[in-house]
Amino acid sequence: CLLACLVHYYNRILEDGVNHLLLQFPQDEPSVSLKLGIETKTSMSPSGESVGSRKERSTKDSSHDAPSPKVSDSDWNKQSGDTSVCWRCHLMACSRLPTVVIFPLRVLASSRRLARRRIRSLLKPSSCNARRFGSVAASTVQRFDWDDVVRIAEEVQEDDGPSDLRGYFKKVGLCNRGSELKSEFVPFLVEDQIVGYIHNGFLDHLRQFKEVFTIGLHNNDCHDESHVKFHSSLITPEERTRAVGDAIKCLGELIPGTRNELYPVASSYGMPVFFSLERAAAPYFGIKAYGVHMNGYVEMDGQKFLWIGKRSVFKPTYPGMLDHLVAGGLPYGISCKENLLKECEEEAGIPRSVSNVATSVGAVAYMDIDGCRYKRDVLFCYDLKLPVEFTPKNEDGEVDSFRLVPVSHVANVIRRTDFFKPNCSLVIIDFLFRHGFISPDSHGYLKLLQSIRSGDCS
């Protein structure tokens, strides 16, 4: 009986994960009555990757503080599909066992309470980790289809028109949050050049790597850190890359979504590279990252259309959202144009004979603070006029489908919805400026034009 109870208890912990455990065991209830929280199912992506998707709950139940409905033993067994084990029966039987046998169960209960308290401390609004967990909303699958896009794009709304720029400003704001939190970050220096910014909370995790990082103090009377540097023994770019890479591996789940793709780290674009950093870790070190985005458009009967992609629901970031025809980060050791040609082939099946005429038209930049993450991104923008008969075809499984949409309808969707991946909106707004879809007579024209480059565009 004791063995079955222990196995069942451990299985529940392993299956539901730490976040589910928090919802199952409320803070002020000492009993082991089970409660329902967020149910997570795991499916497999076409590449064999395990993907979790959460069932949506109502707004009323979304708060961590809101109690979840209690479930009887029989109901729980029905929900879990396990009718062979009765949790309460095992506990009642175990209560008659000697204390020396009960001790392991008490240790488990104590561990549960400690885990629960630790999680609650992480979820405080002022916590770096709490805001980091909040940012996981970017991995929530968006529930809409192309019919929803068409319906909203074609709606005539009296309070929203092409000359009303408020919807565009909102999208710019989504990419430029948290400027008031800059004081929580300290500069990351390499060879006396600022290459990034690290949050004080994340810095606590870097202290253990004394042979990789050194943390300088502002002065002898102040305990606030003023900068972070590499250890003096790390001189070459290769040594720094290996050392910081090993540290990132040790940090594990603190930096989710690692993909073994390296970004070059320099003081600005085109300058000497100090070292290379895992792409997923770039915002945790406040490293400036670069990417390429391409507007693929078609002209028919005097009207312009944009090819829009809908991201695969298996994408780890912004699954199911609308995206450019072609876009991608700029990894180490490849030029912007070569990277664009590669992405054109992989994401849209565009042959080099066609994509080679893509035109560089500028860049947009933004700075976004989300918990411990400080994104300082610069996106190089390209336009490609495509033949009318061309139809894109995804080759890498990252795009669910493509649609050719009138540019005026794309503008409506950006202003009225959150269907687009946030930084794509900036690039499309830039396209609208350059192709005359936003008039200088519109209130806020110059301010909007400036705002899409409000980041560190260097």
Image (tube, rainbow, N blue to C red):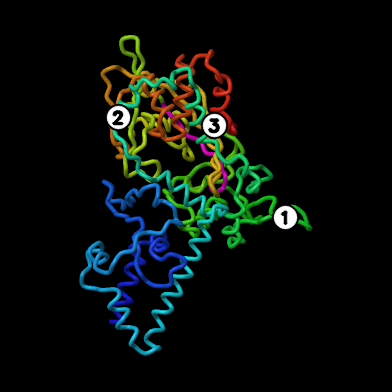
Residue 44 position in % (x across, y down): 27, 51
Above-or-below relation of 444 to 81: above
SS category of the residue bearing label 2: strand
- What residue is disc 1 on? 217
Kindly identify the amino acid type of the residue bearing the numbered disc 1.
Leu
* Kind of residue sitting beneath label 2: Phe
Say which of 457 and 25 sits in front. 25
Q: Quadrant of residue 425?
A: top left
Task: Give the answer, above or below, for where 363 lies relative to 137.
Answer: above
Q: Is residue 346 visible?
A: no
Q: Secondary structure at mark 1?
A: strand
Residue 443 seen: yes
Instruction: Please name the residue that numbered disc 2 is placed on.
Output: 402
Q: Nearer the viewer, residue 205 or 134?
A: 134
Q: How many marks?
A: 3
Residue that appears at 32% across and 39% down: 143
Q: Position of residue 125 (x, y in %)?
A: 54, 52
Residue appearing at x 42%, y 79% in the figure? 106
Q: CA distance from mark 2 to mark 1?
A: 52 Å
Residue wearing tag 3: 365
Image height of 45 relative to 426, above or below: below
Q: Which region is colored magenta?
A: 284-294
